[in-house]
Image (cartoon, rainbow, N blue to C red):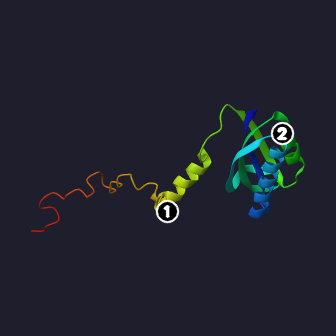
Amino acid sequence: MALYENVFIARQDVPVTQVEALTTQYAELVTSLGGTVSKKEYWGLRSLTYRIKKNRKGHYTLLNIDGPPAAVKELERTMSINEDIIRYLTVRVDELEEGPSAIMLRSAEKADRPMGDRDRGDRWGDRPPRRERSRFGDEGMAPAAPAGAGEEE
């Protein structure tokens, strides 16, 4: 049997419980057609790069599938009929990744960082302080007056 990775995006207004139900439904479809789903990952509600069918966000889900091509074809046909799915992509791979995907690792790293690192104002914290300059030059002070100037005798 062949190995596949399938990622689908559900509409933003669909509740998370319904996305999980769709994931379970698709996994059962693949298993009923002789395949297995080794991993199901919900990546969360993420912003889309551009609007798709009037949606700015979508629920992303990954399925790792080991099954015959007929099972994947039926899975894609079912996804294309469902109005809650706005995009899907299935890719044949040489081997399936064990453990969490790169998206899950990146989101875990982001969650581990302190809030200050994500703050835009802290981005320039490494930069050396700005050198103070006056309008008179680099010295930062007005030029000294010559001795005796301004004194009246």
Mark 1: which secondary structure? helix
- Indicate left or right for 75 with 66 as reference: right
Report the number of discs.
Answer: 2
The amino acid beneath tag 1 is Met
- Indicate left or right for 106 with 19 as reference: left
Using the image as rendered, state which of residue 73 and residue 124 is in the foreground.
Answer: 73
Circles 1 and 2, Cβ within 8 Å, touching? The answer is no
Residue 21 x/y as whole percent: 79, 59
Q: Residue lying farthest left?
A: 153
- Tell me the residue at 88%/52% (across/down): 82
Q: Which mark, residue 71? A: 2
Q: Quadrant of the C terminus?
A: bottom left
The amino acid beneath tag 2 is Ala
N-term-proximal mark, 1 vs 2: 2
Is 17 rendered above or below residue 106? Answer: below
- Tell me the residue at 29%/51% (across/down): 138
In which quarter of the view is residue 97 placed? top right
Q: Which residue is mark 1?
A: 115
